[in-house]
Image (tube, helix red, strand yellow):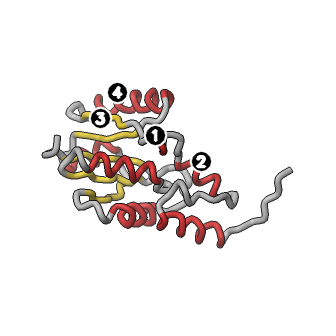
Amino acid sequence: MKDTIAAYPGSFDPFTLGHENLVRRAASMFEQIIVAVAASRKETLFSLDERVEIAADVLRSIPNVQVIGFDCLLVDFLRERGIRIVVRGVRTLADFEYEARMVAMNCKLYPEMETVFLLPAEEHGYLAASVVREIARHGGDVSQFVPETVFSRLQRKFDSTKEPTTCL
């Protein structure tokens, strides 16, 4: 597979150490990894441009990784670039069930597509961007879950919108 291009899609809001670990591992398996940062229909903490910039900053030391934002169906993004392999991380059975449904639908739309599932490294098996986002929103320390550049951006983001929190 080392002569193949693969895509690792996601919203990456925010980009976590789990995401970074998955990209590093996939980069050792494939000639090139395209980290495909998806525009989201849901409200995101960081804009698409910010998420692309953050991921590119975190991954800049990996020579065979490119970060690209996209705002279309994943299968269209892949087809336009001639990419047939998608890398997805699965932490739990619930993740696998969701991803299996997505694979089935995407294969109907793009039959040449294959999906490779990677389990997270043990130390990142519990890590979810949505949980990191929520902890940061409430002033919790997320430095152990995200790369330093992401931590700095989260601090700036929430320092500017800091509201006092009260636990009842």
Could you tell me which secondary element the residue under label 2 belongs to? helix
Q: Camera-side residue: 72 or 27?
A: 27
Q: In this view, does 63 lie above or below 131?
A: below
Could you tell me which secondary element the residue under label 1 belongs to? helix
CB atoms of marks 2 and 1 within 8 Å: no
Q: Which mark is residue 115?
A: 3
Give the image location of residue 112, x and y in percent: 20, 33
Which of the two discs, 2 and 1, labels the residue nearer the N terminus? 1
Label 1 belongs to which residue?
122
Placement of the N terminus among the 4 image quadrants? top left
**Which amino acid, mark 4?**
Ala
Could you tell me which secondary element the residue under label 3 belongs to? strand
Label 2 belongs to which residue?
131
Q: Horizontally, is 60 left or right of 54 in the view? A: left
Q: Gap in Å between the C-alphas at discs 4 and 1?
A: 28 Å
Q: Gap in Å between the C-alphas at discs 3 and 1?
A: 21 Å
**Which amino acid, mark 1?**
Glu
Could you tell me which secondary element the residue under label 4 belongs to? helix
Give the image location of residue 50, x and y in percent: 45, 66
Give the image location of residue 155, x and y in percent: 60, 68
Q: Horizontally, is 150 left or right of 52 in the view? A: right
Disc 2: CA contacts within 10 A as few (<14), some (14-19) or many (>=20): few
Which of the two discs, 3 and 4, labels the residue nearer the N terminus? 4
Q: Gap in Å between the C-alphas at discs 2 and 3?
A: 25 Å
**Which amino acid, mark 3?**
Thr
From the image, state whether disc 3 or disc 4 is nearer to you: 3
Q: Gap in Å between the C-alphas at discs 4 and 2?
A: 27 Å
From the image, state whether disc 2 or disc 3 is nearer to you: 2
From the image, state whether disc 4 or disc 1 is nearer to you: 1
Q: Horizontally, is 168 left or right of 119 in the view? A: right
